[in-house]
Image (cartoon, grey):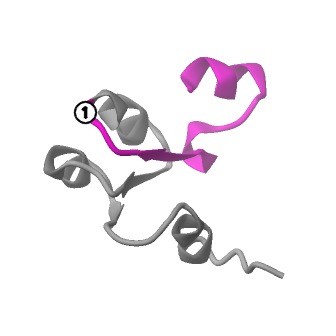
């Protein structure tokens, strides 16, 4: 994620990371907005926000993106 952000000239504070497993914790911790999605407790603890129900479209709703 860091390399991609640098290559695309995107500030990491503007990156949203979504994960569910322990391997996602570094990515979530280094992003501007970390979201644990139906994740293990350890991941939820490392994230600013946790979504525990619903499908992936729940993330869009959380971000305020409407399905038209």
- Above or below residue 31? Residue 53 is below
- Above or below residue 22? Residue 52 is below
Residue drawn at (33%, 57%) of the image: 38
Residue 57 shown in magenta = no
Residue situated in front as seen by the camera: 53 or 42:
53
Answer left or right for 24 relative to 66.
left
Residue drawn at (36%, 33%) of the image: 24
Q: Which residue is mark 1?
A: 22
Query: Percent from the top left, x then y, of residue 12?
Result: 57, 38
The secondary element bearing badge 1 is classed as: helix
Which of the image's four quarters has the C terminus?
bottom right
Answer left or right for 25 relative to 3.
left
Residue drawn at (44%, 71%) of the image: 54
- Above or below residue 25? Residue 59 is below
Furthest toward the right, the residue is 68
Residue drawn at (54%, 61%) of the image: 56
Which of the image's four quarters has the N terminus?
top right
Query: Percent from the top left, x then y, of residue 63?
Result: 59, 71
Residue 3 shown in magenta = yes
Q: Quadrant of residue 61?
A: bottom right
Query: Percent from the top left, x then y, of residue 2?
Result: 56, 23
Circle 1 residues within 10 Å: few <14, some 14–19, many ≥20: some
Q: Quadrant of residue 20?
A: top left
Q: Magenta span covers which residues?
A: 1-22
Q: Count the marks.
A: 1
């Amino acid at each position: 994620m860091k390399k991609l952000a640098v290559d695309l000239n995107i500030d990491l504070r503007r990156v949203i990371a979504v994960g569910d497993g322990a391997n996602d914790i570094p990515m979530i911790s280094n992003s501007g907005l970390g979201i644990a999605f139906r994740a293990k407790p350890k991941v939820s603890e490392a994230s600013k926000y946790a979504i525990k129900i619903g499908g992936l479209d729940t993330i869009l709703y959380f971000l305020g993106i409407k399905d038209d």
